[in-house]
Image (cartoon, rainbow, N blue to C red):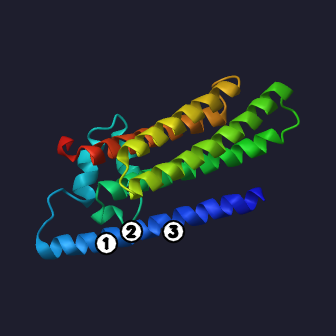
């Protein structure tokens, strides 16, 4: 049943992203025809957004990662791209957590912490999906709240596992950086004049 729920979540996320890309392409073609384009797009926009990030190089890498959308992306597209990358990272953390839970050589307290972390990562992935849904419906404030909840959830995961030198800690640090990139983009989406 859990596999079906995950598959369904991924399917819903893919449909939402595809719908957004179709709308974005239609808007882009309409803007170009009517000469209404006022904000930069694509690489120019990516560079402006990433200039505001403390992880500029990672930001550029992430926001340029979609070969179809990145070259013509607006702020909403960039937010969705960054959230997709964060969700992929969360999926990797979940996979590693599942492998570690099955390691019989680990202390039972660590295994329990990993089981708690697994539940938290599933929550974080769900919160990223909620963030995308909020963006697609124009609710940037809600998107900010969902992103902050995802960050808090991953913090809870880190606390549940003793030590800070394990692979999950390294992956969760990357997850935080990816979420912070998404926060920058969604804040700019709410206040594009800050570009």
Name the residue furthest left. 35
Crowding near pointer 2: few (<14 within 10 Å), some, many (20+)? some
Residue plotted at (35% across, 49% down): 60
Residue plotted at (67% across, 63% down): 7
The answer to which of marks 2 and 3 sits earlier in the sequence is: 3
Do the CB atoms of the residues marked 3 and 1 lie less than 8 Å apart? no
Whether 86 is drawn above or below 54: the answer is below
Coordinates of residue 113 in the picture (x, y in percent):
75, 30
Crowding near pointer 3: few (<14 within 10 Å), some, many (20+)? few
Whether 94 is drawn above or below 177: the answer is below
**Quarter of the image with the C terminus in it:** top left
What residue sits right under mark 3 in the picture? 15
The answer to which of marks 3 and 1 sits earlier in the sequence is: 3
**Quarter of the image with the N terminus in it:** bottom right
Residue plotted at (80% across, 39% down): 101
Q: Check disc 1 and report its element: helix, strand or loop.
A: helix
What residue sits right under mark 1 in the picture? 25
Q: Check disc 3 and report its element: helix, strand or loop.
A: helix
Cα separation between marks 2 and 1: 6 Å
What residue sits right under mark 2 in the picture? 21
Q: Using residue 48 as the reference point, say whether residue 13 is left or right of it.
A: right
Crowding near pointer 1: few (<14 within 10 Å), some, many (20+)? some
Residue nearest the viewer, comparing 22 with 99: 22
Whether 114 is drawn above or below 32: the answer is above
Do the CB atoms of the residues marked 2 and 1 lie less than 8 Å apart? yes
Q: Quadrant of residue 107?
A: top right
Q: Check disc 2 and report its element: helix, strand or loop.
A: helix
Cα separation between marks 2 and 3: 10 Å
Coordinates of residue 96 in the picture (x, y in percent):
70, 44
Q: Which mark is drawn over residue 100?
A: none
């Amino acid at each position: 049943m859990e596999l079906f729920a995950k598959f369904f979540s991924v399917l819903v996320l893919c449909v939402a992203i595809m719908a957004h890309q179709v709308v974005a392409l239609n808007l882009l073609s309409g803007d170009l025809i009517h000469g209404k384009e006022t904000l930069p797009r694509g690489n120019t926009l990516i560079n402006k957004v990433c200039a505001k990030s403390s992880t500029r190089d990672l930001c550029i890498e992430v926001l340029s990662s979609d070969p179809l959308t990145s070259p013509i992306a607006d702020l909403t597209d960039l937010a969705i791209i960054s959230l997709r990358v964060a969700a992929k990272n969360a999926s990797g953390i979940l996979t590693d957590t599942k492998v570690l839970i099955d390691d019989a050589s680990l202390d039972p307290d660590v295994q329990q912490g990993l089981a708690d972390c697994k539940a938290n990562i599933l929550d974080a992935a769900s919160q990223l999906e909620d963030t995308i849904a909020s963006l697609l419906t124009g609710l940037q404030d809600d998107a900010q709240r969902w992103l902050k909840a995802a960050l808090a959830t991953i913090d809870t995961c880190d606390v549940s596992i003793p030590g800070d030198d394990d692979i999950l800690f390294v992956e969760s640090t990357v997850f935080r950086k990816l979420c912070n990139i998404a926060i920058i983009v969604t804040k700019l989406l709410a206040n594009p004049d800050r570009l």
